[in-house]
Image (spheres, rainbow, N blue to C red):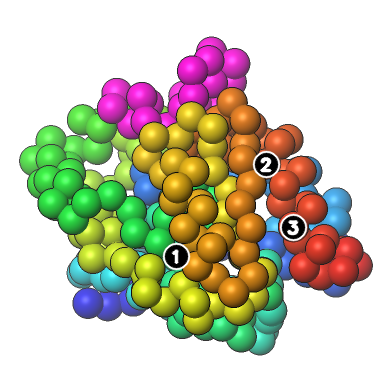
Amino acid sequence: MTVPEIRLTAPEGPAQAPLVVLGPSLGTSTILWEDVVPLLRGRYRVTAWDLPGHGVSPAATAGFTVGEIADAVAAAVRDHAGAGPVLYAGVSLGGAVGLELLLRHPDLVGAAAIVCSGAKLGQEQAWHERAQTVRSRGTGALVIPSAERWFAPGSLERRPEIGGRLLHALRDADDESYALCCEALAAFDVRDGLGEIAVPVLAMWGEHDAVTPETSAAEIAAGVQNGRAGRIADAAHLAPAEQPEASVAELLDFFDAATGGAR
C-alpha cells in the first residue's frame, strides 16, 4: 500500500475566509461540485480534489486504502491551509475519506459534511467484482448502470449538461485507478470508530438514493458525538450536482453554525 498523489483546485473566495474542501464520488471529478462552488465562495474559500486517476490527479501505481487517500488529502490541504482547521464536504467515497480524515487527522477538520455516503459502503465481494469488470472492460462498461444509480428520476432531463459531463468523467477515469478505489472501498469500514469523532458532522442523504439511503446517514449521525442528518429532496447519489442550491443551503447552515458565521 502507498499514499497516492492528490491534487486540489486553486482555492476560490476571500483569502482570509475559512477553507472548505470538497471531495468527489467514485468515477466523478471536481465537476460534481462545479455548481456549488460559486454559491459557497462568497463566504468561504473553496477548493476541491480529484481521486487518483480521475480529473487532474495522477493515475495510481499501487494499491491504497481509503485511509491513505485521506492522508494524501491531508497533506495537500496542509500545503494550502497550514495547520487548519478546515471545513470538509465529500460525496460517497469522498465522504468515506472525510470520515477517515476525522479519525486520522482530527486536528485538521473543524466540521465535516458526509454526503450520500456511509461508514461502510456496499459489500466487499461486489466491489471486487466491479474492479474485475473495469480491468477487463474499462470504466465505459459502467456508464449505464452508474447513470441509473447516480441520478434521481428527472435529474438527467432537468440538468442534462452536468449529468452528461459526469458520465464522461467516469468513462475517462483511469481503469486501474478506478479498480484500486473499488478495492479500497471493499476494505473500508469505520463503523466501530464513529464514537471517536467529536467535531460537528452533518450526514446528508438524497431522497432517492438507493446506494446510501437514509439509514446510512442516520448511522453516521447517531454514531458520532455531535451529528445530525439532513435530507436533499429530488436527489439520488450525486446530490450536489442534482440539487446544488438545496445542497448549498444545508452546507451553509452547517458551516456557519460550526464557525460562528463565516468571517
Q: To which residue does mark 2 refer?
A: 247
Pick whichever of labels 3 and 1 is earlier in the sequence: 1
Q: Nearer the viewer, residue 191 or 50?
A: 191
**From what the image shows, is residue 224 above or below residue 138?**
below
- Where does the magenta region start and end? 144-166
Amino acid marked by disc 3: Phe
Q: Nearer the viewer, residue 241 or 123?
A: 123
Instruction: Decide if residue 21 is in sight here.
Output: no
Pick whichever of labels 3 and 2 is earlier in the sequence: 2
Amino acid marked by disc 1: Val
Q: CA distance from mark 3 to mark 1?
A: 19 Å
Q: Residues within 10 Å of mark 2 (few under 14, many from 20)?
A: many
Asked whether disc 3 touches disc 2, contact meaning CB atoms under 8 Å apart, the reply is no
Q: Residues within 10 Å of mark 3 (few under 14, many from 20)?
A: many
Q: To which residue does mark 3 refer?
A: 254
**From what the image shows, is residue 145 above or below residue 17?**
above
Q: CA distance from mark 3 to mark 2?
A: 11 Å
- Residue 259 shown in magenta: no
Instruction: Decide if residue 195 is in sight here.
Output: yes
Q: Identify which residue is drawn at 72% across, 67% down.
A: 19
**Mark on residue 97?**
1
Q: Quadrant of residue 189?
A: bottom left
- Residue 162 shown in magenta: yes
- For the C terminus, the quadrant is bottom right
Q: Identify which residue is drawn at 82% across, 61% down.
A: 256
Secondary structure beneath dot 3 equals helix
